[in-house]
Amino acid sequence: MTLWPLLGIVMVIAGFALRLNPLLVVVCSALATGLLAGLEPLAVVAALGKAFNDNRYISVTWIILPLIGLLERHGLQQRAQSLVRTLRGASLGRLLVAYLAFRQITSALGMKDIGGHAQTVRPLVAPMAEAAAAQTHGDLSAEQREQIRAMAAATDNVGLFFGEDIFFAIASILLIQGVFESAGHALTPLQLSLWAVPSALCAFAIHGSRLLRFDRRLGRGGTGGGQ
């Protein structure tokens, strides 16, 4: 057994310490490790290609994020705000309550990645919430805009956290099942997910009331602090 392949780890540490391109460091380290282990160059490249192909869906995230940034640069947020201004009766509270319901329902169906801070809240939900608040309450201060963005992000968190446990195939449900089973309580994932429904309903009622109260405080000139 030779220890030469471990030099790949040293290369990774040195490359990161020198702040070199991470992708270049990892690829070069992988190639060096394979060659030092006695593999042929084509075998090393084939192993890298197979690993990339087996995990190709992970790379989708790095494609979506630049796409969202490009859309924002070309006016995605402004388009979202314009859409809200065309809706009659649209208000900050109603909009965020509707998004809370959407986030909880889709998460309960297992579609927990359909929303999120980077892909939904920042480019769509927060600008739409700001436009709805400005349409109802007039010009907003910088502090009020920050409060609205924080509430939009919190709404996504609450909807996801209390909605995903209703989906019985989620990792958290399986973890809870394992803990109960180790304690001698045999429960199925479906039983656990059903008990998550009351918590989700309470979370919707509590956070929904916070959103509506926050909207009213903006109308009275407050910032919604302390909610």
Image: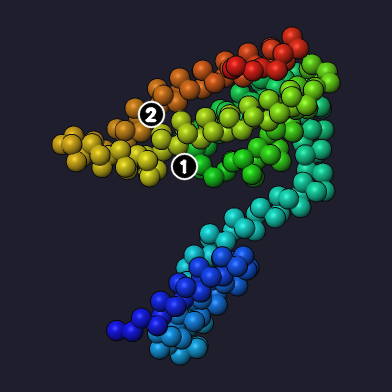
Q: Of all residues shown, which one is farthest toward the top?
A: 220
Residues at circles 1 and 2 in contact by the CB criterion of under 8 Å:
no
State the image coordinates of residue 50 (x, y, percent, origin top left): 48, 75
Left or right: 57, with 89 as reference point = left
Q: Is residue 54 visible?
A: yes
Left or right: 187, with 108 as reference point = left
Q: What residue is rendered at 53% in x and 70% in y?
A: 14
Q: Nearer the viewer, residue 150 or 59?
A: 150
Question: Which quadrant is the C terminus positioned in?
Answer: top right
State the image coordinates of residue 22 (x, y, percent, origin top left): 59, 66
Density class for disc 2 (Cα within 10 Å; few <14, some 14-19, many ≥20) is: many
Q: Is residue 134 above or below residue 174?
A: above
Tag of residue 8: none
How many circles with numbers are drawn on the protein? 2
Q: Is residue 53 visible?
A: no
Q: Is residue 189 above or below residue 43?
A: above
Residue on which disc 2 sits: 196
Residue on which disc 1 sits: 110
Density class for disc 1 (Cα within 10 Å; few <14, some 14-19, many ≥20) is: some
Question: Which quadrant is the N terminus positioned in?
Answer: bottom left
